[in-house]
Image (spheres, rainbow, N blue to C red):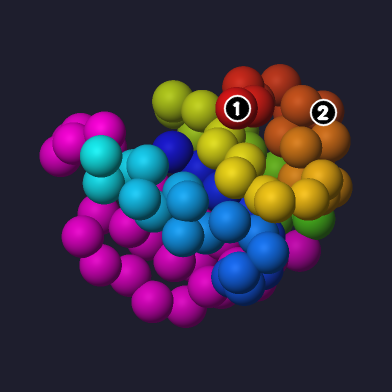
Amino acid sequence: IFYVGQVMDRKGIDILMEAYKKCNMPDTQLYIVGGINSKDNIVFVEFKTKEDLADYYRAADLLYFFPNKKFGIGVNEAMAIGTQVI
């Protein structure tokens, strides 16, 4: 599961992490691009350029999860690559 965006309250990271934990999918990892810490199958990846992000969007096997409390450009970027958006 893949998310990209700044790690801040208005981005809904808390909602994303809670939803991921409730899914109880031990063989699935959650990638958060825009952060720096990793734990419990949640991998935080440092900031990436738009060019580097395209590879992450393409690599997402399951979906692109976007819990933002306001609209963000990540939805457009993911859809442009063909990644499923929830």
Left or right side of 17 for 68: right
Say which label, 1 or 2, has the lower sequence index. 2
Image quarter of the C terminus: top right
Q: Quadrant of residue 67?
A: top right
The image shows residue 17 at horizontal and vertical percentages of 39, 53
The one nearer the camera, 12 or 79, is 12
The image shows residue 71 at horizontal and vertical percentages of 82, 46
State the residue position of label 2: 80
Amino acid type at mark 2: Ala
Between circles 1 and 2, the one closer to the viewer is 1
Amino acid type at mark 1: Ile
Query: Magenta residues?
Result: 23-49
Identify the mark at residue 86; answer none if there is no mark.
Answer: 1
Mark 2 Cα-neighbour bin, 10 Å: few <14, some 14–19, many ≥20: few
The image shows residue 9 at horizontal and vertical percentages of 61, 69
Q: Please check the rendered image and state whether residue 30 is part of the magenta-colored stretch, yes or no.
A: yes
Q: Residue at x 46, y 60 (%)?
A: 14
Q: Quadrant of residue 37?
A: bottom left
Left or right side of 64 for 80: right
The image shows residue 75 at horizontal and vertical percentages of 76, 37
Q: Please check the rendered image and state whether residue 36 is part of the magenta-colored stretch, yes or no.
A: yes
